Amino acid sequence: MEILDGKRVSNDIKDEIAEAVKKMKDNGEKVPHLAAVIVGNDGASLTYVGSKVRACKRVGFESTLIQLPNTTSEVELLKTIAELNENPDIDGFIVQLPLPDQIDTQKVIMAIDPNKDVDGFHPTNFGKMALDMSTFIPATPFGNLELLERYNIETQGKRTVVVGRSHSVGRPMSILMGRKGFPGNCTVTQAHSRTKNIEDVIAEADIVISALGIPQFIKADMVKEGAVVIDVGITRVPDETKEKGYYITGDVDYENVSKKASYITPVPGGVGPMTIAMLLKNTLLARERHGAELT
Ligand code: GUN
């Protein structure tokens, strides 16, 4: 079994991005600028956004964090988005999800300029992804593809089971694994909460990608010997004995599944850091496109 070390690979990618930024600076060009909008005080969301802003510093990007109160109205958030769309200094931005109940997430995503949508959530970008056109691929699925590519894991003709159908991970992941090319060319099954005999479906998979958010859902007896296992789940489980009051766990029973898997991502240190690295990569791409438009 080999660990898919997202921490190491994400550091390699950040080094590559930092190198590209250094070249931009040396040429007197503007460096990429990412903005992140967060509404409310959800602990996990604040942590993620904090990591994204720190990662910008690490690679030499500019960053702007816009923190809005939990009571922010939809109109107010849409106004902030319109300002970011108009601001020529901002190359890309994200609105951290989930949003409070008074705000319609779809309306918010639709309001983002697709050219600045580095999350790849806007229907224009999602559609382009499904049609094999150049676009921003959502960061978590993009990170999974990058891990498969950098570890040179054969995907052609393999049976991939994606567990979960969220718009940000499961749905795009299932599309990407079935696309032509590498990584891709898989026979994909999209499993979800209504799938009958889900254990049997997962047991057929050469590649399992779990994005459910249910701790320890994937057990060793569900996984084929030699399977590649990618765990997208990141759940905070309350635990008074821990300094932070919780511990982080994935969808996969790592201790037992790792004994059967050929490759496996740990949690933490697998998919999480890759997501951040790929958001940076999308922002670099946004800057390059934006710069090209202006010259
Ligand atoms: N919430 C959890 N993951 C993500 C992500 O990749 N992007 C945004 N905008 N919100 C998230």
Image: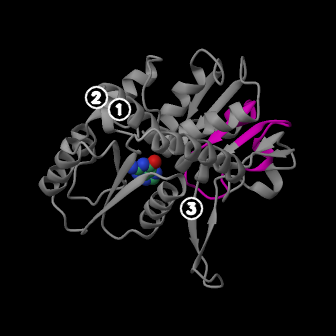
| Residue topped by disc 2 | 294
Q: Nearer the viewer, residue 280 or 206?
A: 280
Q: Nearer the viewer, residue 29 or 284?
A: 29
Q: Position of residue 84 (x, y in %)?
A: 23, 47
Q: Amino acid at mark 2?
A: Leu
Q: Amino acid at mark 1?
A: Gly
Could you tell whether 41 is left or right of 157 in the image? Answer: left
In the rendered image, which quarter is residue 186 located in?
Answer: top right
Asked if 187 appears above or below 96 in the picture, the reply is above
C-alpha separation, residue under disc 2 versus residue under disc 3: 43 Å
Please tell me whether residue 202 belongs to the stretch shown in magenta: yes
Q: Position of residue 99 (x, y in %)?
A: 31, 57
Instruction: Write the start and end of the magenta stretch as one range.
Output: 200-229
C-alpha separation, residue under disc 1 versus residue under disc 2: 5 Å
In the rendered image, which quarter is residue 50 located in?
Answer: bottom left
| Residue topped by disc 3 | 235
Q: Disc 1, disc 2: CB below 8 Å?
A: yes
| Residue topped by disc 1 | 291
Q: Quadrant of the C terminus?
A: top left
Asked if 290 appears above or below 278 in the picture, the reply is above
Residue located 54% across and 57% down the image: 58
Check the image and tell me how it is coloured: one colour
Q: Dot 2: what SS?
A: helix
Residue located 32% across and 38% down the image: 116
Q: Is residue 192 visible?
A: no
Q: Quadrant of the N terminus?
A: top right
Please tell me whether residue 58 belongs to the stretch shown in magenta: no
In terms of sequence position, does the residue under pointer 2 or pointer 3 come before the other? 3
Label 2 Cα neighbours within 10 Å, binned few <14 / some 14-19 / many ≥20: few
In terms of sequence position, does the residue under pointer 3 or pointer 1 come before the other? 3
Residue located 52% across and 56% down the image: 55
Could you tell whether 38 is left or right of 165 in the image? Answer: left
